[in-house]
Image (cartoon, rainbow, N blue to C red):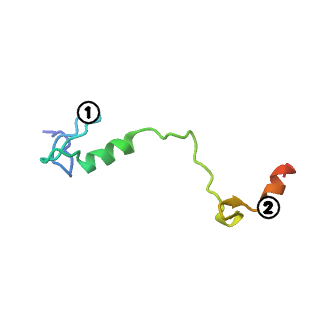
């Protein structure tokens, strides 16, 4: 006999579709919130390349990187 899955945070059924359950005090269940956010598609179509922090100085790219970009490197 199969049982419907329940949230480990609030103990309420998760349902076949995304469902945001509430805790007894009326707040949204943080576990249900995390589950729903994890199920949503990514906002960006592909992974974004991480910035090399050494090439940035005081919030601005270093001059050598700017020169390379301007020269089409």
C-alpha separation, residue under disc 2 versus residue under disc 1:
54 Å
Give the number of the mark in front: 2 or 1: 2
**Quadrant in the picture for residue 60:** bottom right
Query: In this rendering, would 45 be left or right of 69?
Result: left
* Residue placed under numbered mark 2 in the picture: 63
Q: Neighbour class for label 2 at 10 Å: few (<14), some, many (≥20)?
A: few
* Residue placed under numbered mark 1 in the picture: 16
Q: Residue furthest top?
A: 17
Secondary structure under badge 1?
Answer: loop
Q: Neighbour class for label 1 at 10 Å: few (<14), some, many (≥20)?
A: few
Query: In this rendering, would 43 be left or right of 32?
Result: right
Query: In this rendering, would 48 be left or right of 11?
Result: right
Residue depicted at x 17% and y 48%: 10
Query: In this rendering, would 17 be left or right of 6?
Result: right
Residue 41: x and y in percent read 45, 38
Residue 3: x and y in percent read 15, 40
**Quadrant in the picture for residue 1:** top left
């Amino acid at each position: 006999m199969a049982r419907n899955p329940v949230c480990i945070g609030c103990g309420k059924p998760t349902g076949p579709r995304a469902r945001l359950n509430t805790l007894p005090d009326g707040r949204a269940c943080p576990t249900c919130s995390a589950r729903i956010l994890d199920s949503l598609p990514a906002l960006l179509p592909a992974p974004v390349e991480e910035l090399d922090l050494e090439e940035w100085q005081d919030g601005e790219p270093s001059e050598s990187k700017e020169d390379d970009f301007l020269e089409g490197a």
